[in-house]
Each structure stands twice: as C-alpha cells, then as structure tokens.
Amino acid sequence: MPSRSERSLADRISAGGRRLTPQRVLVARALADARRALSAQELYDRLHTTQPRLGRATVFRALEAQVQDGMARRLERSGHVSVYVACDPEHHHHLVCERCERVEDLDEKLLQPLLRSVDSRYGFHVNHTALDIYGLCASCRRASRKAAG
Amino acid sequence: MPSRSERSLADRISAGGRRLTPQRVLVARALADARRALSAQELYDRLHTTQPRLGRATVFRALEAQVQDGMARRLERSGHVSVYVACDPEHHHHLVCERCERVEDLDEKLLQPLLRSVDSRYGFHVNHTALDIYGLCASCRRASRKAAG
DNA sequence: TTGACAATGATACTCGGTCTCAACTAGCCT
DNA sequence: AGGCTAGTTGAGACCGAGTATCATTGTCAA
Ligand SMILES: [Zn+2]
Ligand SMILES: [Zn+2]
Ligand SMILES: [Zn+2]
Ligand SMILES: [Zn+2]
C-alpha cells in the first residue's frame, strides 16, 4: 500500500524511455527497502526464493538500468564484487558502517579543501574521486560503547 | 647493473621468511620499473613473452606476496580488476593520472580535516578509507595546456 | 487491437582469480 | 660439496561474477 513511494518508483523507472516491467519494479523496491548496499547476486538470491521465474541476468540488467537512470549507484567493493545502493546520483561518496552495513551520504562540501590542496600542492587536476569511508555509524558506535561498558 | 636497487629488492623479498626465487625478482622488478599500476594479467603478458616458462599463477602469487610484504599495494580499479603498484605500505591513497597512468602518493595529512569532520558531523567512527583521485598529473597538464594553445 | 520492438530468461560463454598436485629448488645442516 | 625438506613453481582444472546470445514474451504507442 505504499502507493506514493511505489508511484514515484514506477515513474522513475519509466523516465528515460524504459519500459515498466514487474521485474524492474521488484528489483528497485528490494534495493530501496534494503537501505544498504547489496550485490546483484545477493539481490537475486533474496528475490528468487519468492519469485522463481525471475532470471539472474534480469537482476544484473535491472540494477545497471537503475544506475544509468540515477536511481542507484554502483560501488566497487574490495574483492572484485560490485554492490549497489539506492540513492541519488548527484553526490558521490559514502560512509559505510561495517557493523550494520548501512550506507550514509557524505556531504560533498567536506571534500573541497582536500581537492584544492591536491591542485595547489601537486599541480594535479582532479577529474574524479573514488572515496568510501568505512567504520562505525553513530548508532552502532553508541551500542558498542554501551556493551563495552 | 642497478646493483643497489636490485640488492634491496632481493633483501625485501627475503624479508619475512620468503624464498628468493628468480620469478619473484622478475615480477618485483617489472612492477617497480613500470612506475604505474598494472594488473596481474598485464604483468604476466609482458613477462611471458620473454620468459615463456613463467606461469600465470606464479605472477598472481608473487604480486600477492609483495602486497603482504609491503612492497606493493593493490588497488581495486573500477571494472572488477585489481591493479598493483610498487610503493610503500604506510600511506594509503593515490593520485592516478588518466593520461600517463602514473601513480603519485598523496600526503595523508591532507585527509585529516576531512576525517575529523566526518567524526564530528556524523558521529561516524572512521576505521579505514578507500580513496583514489583521478585526473591529470602536473606534467600531462602542462603538455595538454601547451597543445591546446 | 495490434504490431514493433524492448525486455525477459535459460544458458553458453568470458575472464579474473584460486586451487590442486606433481615436479622442482632455495636454503639449511652436515 | 651433497643431501633434506619444506616452500615454490607451472599446468591445468576449477570457481564465481558478469556478459552475450537468442528464442520467447510482454509493453505500450499508434
Ligand atoms: Zn548515496
Ligand atoms: Zn552501523
Ligand atoms: Zn603509493
Ligand atoms: Zn600524467
């Protein structure tokens, strides 16, 4: 019954001239509901149990389409596996909690001083930066502090 | 003839209780001479032409050993391929030139303000950061300015 | 409604990387 | 120098993520 979010989901899929198929809706909703980064295989495993007719290649294609349509971003996680996270396309970088796996967006403005220094100190002209910060999110940090006493 | 650098190369391989084999020397020297990031396959292709007896698995193993011994670092380049670059183990991040492929080390101190902000603004406890900055190095930048007029 | 053509799903395939194992050898001990 | 032994090599089987192929299906605009 989440007709609002469902609606906008369908709209965003339809945008860009893509056909609105049940498979794409399925994948997009699953990724959005996860609220964390998942690999295509993980997503396929989850969905395949309840949707036996869903193909593996379709999941890969649906995720790729989401990336191109600005509904998700692909992160190259160490170990040569791509993971996908539902989020806006503008920003570029994430805080990834190693305990609960949640992904938080980093304010791009915080990168400006670093990029300026790179230019001035190294004469290096920055085109693109790949940055992911791993650690403990605020809530996991509180929980672990409490547990540690 | 580069007996000094050759010597220290052998020393560094021997350190950590590893046996000094011609294959390891071969791989280590090739990576050091390249002065840029290379994938295991690229390195194998280069070496295999002049050393037909060198095995593919050996190159992968030699590179992995170099990473563990602090002679090289592995970068997860986009497109699920690992590339290796000969450099010290202490620093963590690189400026990668997209024209000449050279890799330059980034002074870690430049990251401190960003990491502090992440802690204070998001309450996020940073364990580890993966950062690579892509663009044009100083010399390629000069060359391209000159060419563009 | 219908037809063009995008999308799906099954499967074959590619390719980076690892595993296995018999043959080899670096390094140590005598 | 000669031998021992455990680490290393190389060939090839294997694995797993991702892509390509192609007949079939389904969307959506006309
Ligand atoms: Zn995000
Ligand atoms: Zn957390
Ligand atoms: Zn470096
Ligand atoms: Zn350059």
Image (cartoon, coloured by chain):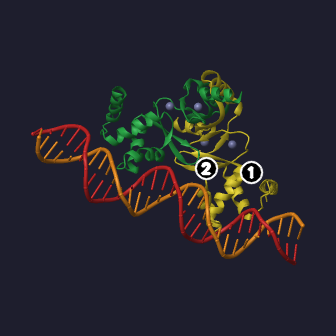
Chain colours: A yellow, B green, C red, D orange
Whether the residue under disc 2 has CB within 8 Å of ligand 1:
no
Label 2 crowd bin: few (<14), some (14–19), many (20+), radius 10 Å: many
Does residue A27 sit above or below A106 in this rendering?
below
Does residue A8 sit above or below B82 in this rendering?
below
User: Can residue A114 be seen?
Assistant: no
Looking at the picture, tell me which residue is in the foreground, C18 or B100: B100
Tag 2 secondary structure: strand
| Residue that carries the numbered disc 2 in the rendered image | A83
User: Can residue A73 be seen?
Assistant: yes
Marks 1 and 2, how far apart at CA: 16 Å
Looking at the picture, tell me which residue is in the foreground, A149 or B73: B73
Is residue B58 shown left or right of residue A59? left
Q: Chain of mark 1?
A: A
Looking at the picture, tell me which residue is in the foreground, B119 or A31: A31
Tag 1 secondary structure: loop
Quarter holding the N terminus of chain B is: top left
- At horizontal 44% and vertical 34% (from top left) the residue drawn is B33
Q: Quadrant of ligand 4?
A: top right
Label 1 crowd bin: few (<14), some (14–19), many (20+), radius 10 Å: some
Q: Using the rendered view, name the quadrant where residue D13 is placed.
A: bottom left
Is residue B3 shown left or right of residue B82? left
Viewer-nearest of discs 1 and 2 = 1
Which of the marked residues, 1 or 2, is nearer the chain's N terminus? 1
Q: How many marks?
A: 2
Is residue A1 shown left or right of residue A55? right
| Residue that carries the numbered disc 1 in the rendered image | A69
Give percent across and percent down for residue B47.
41, 44
Quarter holding the C terminus of chain B is: top right
- At horizontal 79% and vertical 60% (from top left) the residue drawn is A1
Does residue B46 sit above or below B104 in this rendering?
below
Whether the residue under disc 1 has CB within 8 Å of ligand 1:
no
